[in-house]
Image (spheres, rainbow, N blue to C red):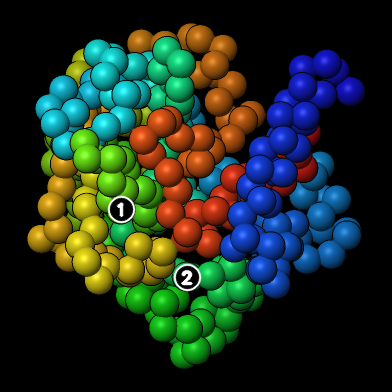
Amino acid sequence: MPLFKLTLLAQACILTGLAFSSPTLIAAEKTIPELVDAVNGTPDAASREAGKKVKLRNHTKGFCTSGYFAPNPELQDSLAIPFFNQSQIKVTARFSLGGTNPKLSDKTPGRFMSLKIDGDKENLNFVTTNVPVFFASNLDDFFTFQTKVKQGAEGKQWLIDNKPDAKAFFDYVKQLPPSPSFANSRYFGVNSFLFTDKQNNSVAGKWIFEPVAGTAALSASELANLGDDFLKAELLQRINTQPAQWNLYVQLAESGDDINNPTVIWPETRKRLLVGQVVINGERDSDSQVQECDKGIFNPLLLPKGIAPSADPILNARTAAYVESFIRRQ
């Protein structure tokens, strides 16, 4: 095995060990490999080996680009997070669709944005979706959901009939129209984090990305005139003339809000703090870090001082699951 792959594997094993230190994971009935098998649809040794050969992964259909993050200087009046004291921080972005099908149509409604914001000394990663509600509150329900959806219409109906969280998710997606661009989607971090305020208290919050260009939806006639692969070309052409931009907010929890359950949507009336602006302009697209961003992982638990994970079991399983998937692709 080449030296760089051995290094990556060592780093992955370290990350896995850190992730498994969570009491939430230790108590889980499903193992991380089982969860990855459920996502990949590889329930046995034969399908697992076949998946390794094609480097099977979730969010297979996607692409990488770049830009920068400009923090809001006024954020320091509310939160004590030194990472955001920088003026501009480089960003590596990956836009994608969900699932393991590399030929999934862009006409489907799901949109995903993952970001690596690499500062001078610390880093911050985001894994976000245009659906603000998650389909499972625990790892067993996550496993059941992923297993059932692989069964097609029958499995989906079972989830609707037996899992209220899954039904709420399907109901939201059903009314969500496809956007004409990744730049016209809102993106949500469905998991909560703990932020240190100026009084050294921890306050819970969720990430929300609001598109500066506004949201937009494709009509039925517009969809009919599009092919299945318009999103990548649209965004890359767009940023040739003007950047794609999002304002990043932290939506703060109030007393009584469930901060450890990603199936719960907090009211829109919750206070939001402007963290800064993401600007995607493709300025570093020739860099190897950007061109090869598909080969790594976006680790949402890679956090700077002043931000900590909540006890959400879905959040705390992400790193270990991403690393397991990463190792299988090597």
Query: Which residue carries the number 2 mark?
Result: 137
Looking at the rendering, which quadrant does residue 177 occupy?
bottom left
Instruction: Name the residue at 12% across, 27% down.
Output: 74
Q: Could you tell me the amino acid type at mark 1?
A: Ala
Label at residue 25:
none
Q: Is residue 108 left or right of residue 324?
A: left
- Residue with the mark numbered 1: 204
Q: Amino acid at mark 2?
A: Ser
Label 1 or label 2, whichever comes before in sequence order: 2
Identify the residue at image location x=59%, y=45%.
319
Q: Quadrant of the C terminus?
A: top right
Left or right of 321? Residue 208 is: left
Residue sitting nearer the eye, 213 or 208: 208
Q: Give the left or right position of residue 175, taking residue 53 as reference.
A: left
Figure check: 64 above or below 214: above
Write down the quadrant of residue 169 in the picture: bottom left
* Other-residue count near label 2 (Cα within 10 Å), few / some / many at <14 / 14–19 / ≥20: some
Instruction: Name the residue nearer the viewer: 303 or 269.
Output: 303
